[in-house]
Amino acid sequence: ALLLTACALLFAATLPLRSQDTVKIMPLGDSITELDWQGGYRSYLYKLLSDSGFAFDYVGRKTSNHNDGSIGFAFPQRYWDHEGYSGRAIYPMWLDSVGRALNANPPQLIILMLGTNDVSNGTRSAVQIRNYMSQFLDSIWTFNPSIRVVISNLPRIVSGSLFSQAKLDTILE
């Protein structure tokens, strides 16, 4: 999560905006995006961007914070917006609904943490998952080709799941 946060901070710095503009960031993905604890990143990204003086706003149709209170700083409610859904897979759920999310709250930057459920259900090959992700990204850029996307890697340590290093490496090729 820290690497994703650092990459998002660096990427946000490259957005061609005036310093007074507010960057609209859409945290989008599965439960890791929705549940901002035990590996979630939204509150930590908020702190990093705020402490660095960035003007930003999270956008999304959901507003929730499942923080366990142990992060050591305030995470204001106005930054709780997101598009994280527990159990959400790239296909078919996100491929069918990404347009509605983008229409409701058009972002300039998407932080994408998606694919964990596709891998862990064990019914799709790595090539299928990679192809679904490609279709998903195409649907974002068909909506608006100027949206920037930061894609997180999948968690590598998941006990009791069907994750394998070989499958993850194939997806990331």
Image (spheres, rainbow, N blue to C red):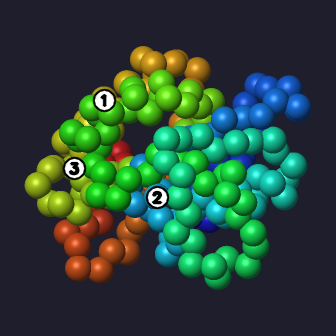
Q: Earlier in the sequence, mark 2 or mark 3?
A: 2
Q: Quadrant of residue 109?
A: top right
Q: Earlier in the sequence, mark 1 or mark 2?
A: 2
> Residue 84's spot in the image, x, y percent?
44, 51
Q: Between marks 1 and 3, how big is the CA–CA gap?
A: 14 Å
Disc marking residue 76: none
Q: Horizontally, is 7 left or right of 150 in the view? A: right
> Residue 94's spot in the image, x, y percent?
31, 39
> Residue 30's spot in the image, x, y percent?
38, 54
Q: Horizontally, is 31 left or right of 112 in the view? A: left
Closer to the eye: label 1 or 3 = 1
Q: Quadrant of residue 110?
A: top right
Label 3: few (<14), some (14–19) or many (≥20) C-alpha neighbours in 10 Å: many
Closer to the eye: label 1 or 2 = 2
Q: Quadrant of residue 119?
A: bottom left
Towards the viewer: 136 or 94: 94
* SS under mark 3: helix
Residue under the point 67% across and 77% down: 71
User: Residue tagged by mark 1?
Assistant: 135
* SS under mark 2: helix
Q: Is residue 5 visible?
A: no
Residue under the point 81% across and 41% down: 55
> Residue 140's spot in the image, x, y percent?
44, 27
Closer to the eye: label 2 or 3 = 2
Q: Which quadrant is home to the C terminus?
A: top left
Q: Which quadrant is home to the N terminus?
A: bottom right
Amino acid type at image mark 1: Gln
Q: Horizontally, is 123 left or right of 29 in the view? A: left
User: Residue tagged by mark 2?
Assistant: 34
Disc marking residue 126: 3
Q: How many marks?
A: 3
